[in-house]
Amino acid sequence: MFNFTKQLNELLIYKINELITDKVKNMKVTIVGAGNVGATCADVISYRGIASEVVLLDIKEGFAEGKALDIMQCATNTGFNTIVSGVTNDYSKTAGSDVVVITSGIPRKPGMTREELIGINAGIVKTVAENVLKFSPDTIIVVVSNPMDTMTYLALKSTGIPKNRIIGMGGALDSSRFRTYLSLALNKPANDIAAMVIGGHGDTTMIPLTRLASYNGIPVTEFLSEEVLQKVAADTMVGGATLTGLLGTSAWYAPGASVAYLVDSILNDQKKMIACSVFVEGEYGQSDICIGVPCIIGKNGVEEILDIQLNDQEKALFAKSADAVRGMNDALKSILV
């Protein structure tokens, strides 16, 4: 007997899968900088099927090509269909990118602050942003290069593209580290914990919002003492420096995965709330800087900046963080002229 319901369900499933496949087919991501963070980002995007095409670009001859080929050789074992290619400094191959990720620049060395990277990385980021826009004028740019808030501001000011299309990744990574340290303190799964870091992406400028962190909807203050929470916040703030000291260079697994998480929300219009460094114009009492705030991230990039209610102490910390970021931006004056 013909089972109409079964046939209808199968047809619906087929059409849904077809739509998803078509959607993914048209999505292209370029990652400029094929170092550890860039390559990890490409690997995660491919493995999760976030985009149909990933282009790795690097100035070092053969480097991006080698990384891309290595990732592609994982396809038969991990089951992804994303096409990953590498190119040496040829921006024409990036044409039509929906999202461009900029990881270019030198990484931090032990004892080096993000601020010390400004002079070197500013020229790199400015050149990269201008080049990718020649071939992908409607792209959304995700900035990873450090010092990230200042490099995001530079990319925005030097290109003049709408502010919703320039996003600094730092808050996504810092929040991930915050949730990890809370998970360890609670001895509970990190995916059951909601927590966010706002402010600048720096060891002394980020603000882990311990007051608002929760475990399955219950404030973590119900489980952890103020002393423990202060240690969690302190560990989060030096999370990057801790790894730099252990590894001898900047971390890459968590940063790469954080970028992929952000790109996924853009390409698949997930409208996730993610702390990102974006241009503020009066939000949280600040203007003319890029700094980490809660954002809704979707197909248009930054679709909304959420105004969460901070207490007086948090407001003071945010203002102090903004002053520090603004101070770093002063070093860009000669570049932006």
Image: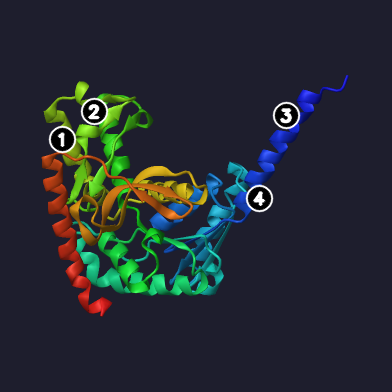
Eye-nearest disc, 1 or 4 = 4
Image point 25% across, 63% down: which residue?
A: 150
> Mark 4 or mark 1, which is nearer the start of the sequence?
4
Eye-nearest disc, 1 or 3 = 3
**What scheme was used to colour the molecule?**
rainbow
Give the quadrant of residue 152: bottom left
**Is 187 on the left or on the right of 191, as rendered?**
left
Specify the label residue 22 is tagged with.
Answer: 4
Kind of residue at badge 3 = Asn
Q: Is residue 318 visible?
A: yes
Circle 2 sits on which residue? 185
> Mark 1 or mark 2, which is nearer the start of the sequence?
2
Specify the label residue 87 is tagged with.
Answer: none
Q: CA distance from mark 2 to mark 1?
A: 10 Å
User: Dot 3, crowdedness within 10 Å: few (<14), some or many (≥20)?
Assistant: few
Image point 23% across, 68% down: which residue?
A: 118
Image point 72% across, 29% down: which residue?
A: 9
Circle 3 sits on which residue? 9
Q: Nearer the viewer, residue 30 or 20?
A: 20
Q: Is residue 220 above or below residue 59?
A: above
User: Dot 4, crowdedness within 10 Å: few (<14), some or many (≥20)?
Assistant: few
In percent of width and height, residue 298 lies at 45, 49
**Is 254 on the left or on the right of 146, as rendered?**
right
Pick the quarter of the image with the N terminus: top right
> Mark 3 or mark 1, which is nearer the start of the sequence?
3
Q: CA distance from mark 1 to mark 4?
A: 47 Å
